[in-house]
Amino acid sequence: MEPFHLRRGFTLIELMVVLAIMVVIMGVVLTSQSSFNRTIVLANTAYDIALTLRSAGVYGLGSRVTSSASNAGYGIHVETETSGAFTLFADTYPAIGQSGLCHPQVDSFAPDARPGNCAYEVNQGERVADYTLENAITISNFCAYDGGWSCANGGNVHSLDIVFARPNADPFMSANGSYALSSPVTRACITVSSPQGDSRFISIGESGGITANASSCP
């Protein structure tokens, strides 16, 4: 039997090498997990905005009654001044019979008669709910197409409204708080970004199609 004092154990250098390998592996695992979590949170935020748009479509096409009007359109409002939030609103101003309507009105008693100018009026009681983005995610850009693309990052668009009103599934979209009858916005795109620089894109099509994982925004 080998004498006790001649038995060889682990040296300090070997222990340090093993410890260093374990630290590197743990660092890789934690970094990958953190990156995965950021990706999931950002994707969920994009889907939340898309689902809110879907809800606005359901409310508007279903003529959900508000406290001040029936047959009102519903939409969401985003603006550069509040990049960490957006608003779901009922398009109730101006009332039926007043000027400024963005959609056709033939008979004020018809089921599809509705108020509104397809833009959010902050002082007219249109707010339904404010949604705050979490985890420092922001709406970093949004764009409107009216024959050509204009975006918030280019300084041309500071607010965007996307409204759904019966009986049309097509959204009514306004840039800078004004619906243009002669050249309306027909498509839009919203970019959400994380502090690390990752982005997801929500696309709104001319026929009302909403995509929460679009490939890009203009």
Image (tube, rainbow, N blue to C red):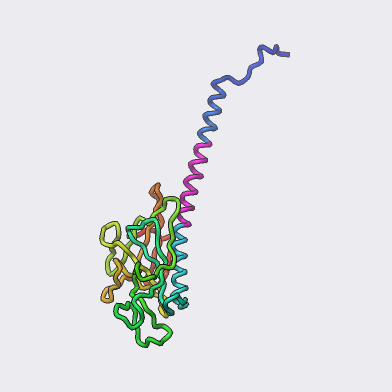
**Looking at the rendering, in which quadrant would you find the C terminus?**
bottom left
Which residues lie in the magenta part? 26-44
Q: Say which of 94 and 32 sits in front.
A: 94
- Magenta-colored stretch includes residue 34: yes
* Residue 98 picture quarter: bottom left
- Magenta-colored stretch includes residue 22: no
**Secondary structure mostly taken by the magenta-highlighted segment of the chain:** helix
Q: Is residue 95 visible?
A: yes
x%, y% of residue 99? 29, 80
Q: Residue at x 35, y 87 (%)?
A: 106
* Residue 185 picture quarter: bottom left
Numbered label tally: 0
* Residue 9 picture quarter: top right
x%, y% of residue 58? 47, 73
x%, y% of residue 20? 52, 29
**Looking at the rendering, in which quadrant would you find the N terminus?**
top right
In this view, the residue farthest toward the right is 1
Q: Residue at x 45, y 75 (%)?
A: 67
x%, y% of residue 102? 32, 77
Vertical placement of 38 versus 53: above or below? above
Vertical placement of 172 versus 189: above or below? below
Q: Say which of 216 and 180 sits in front.
A: 180
Q: Residue at x 36, y 56 (%)?
A: 83
Q: Is residue 187 visible?
A: no
Q: Say which of 201 and 106 sits in front.
A: 106
Vertical placement of 19 versus 158: above or below? above
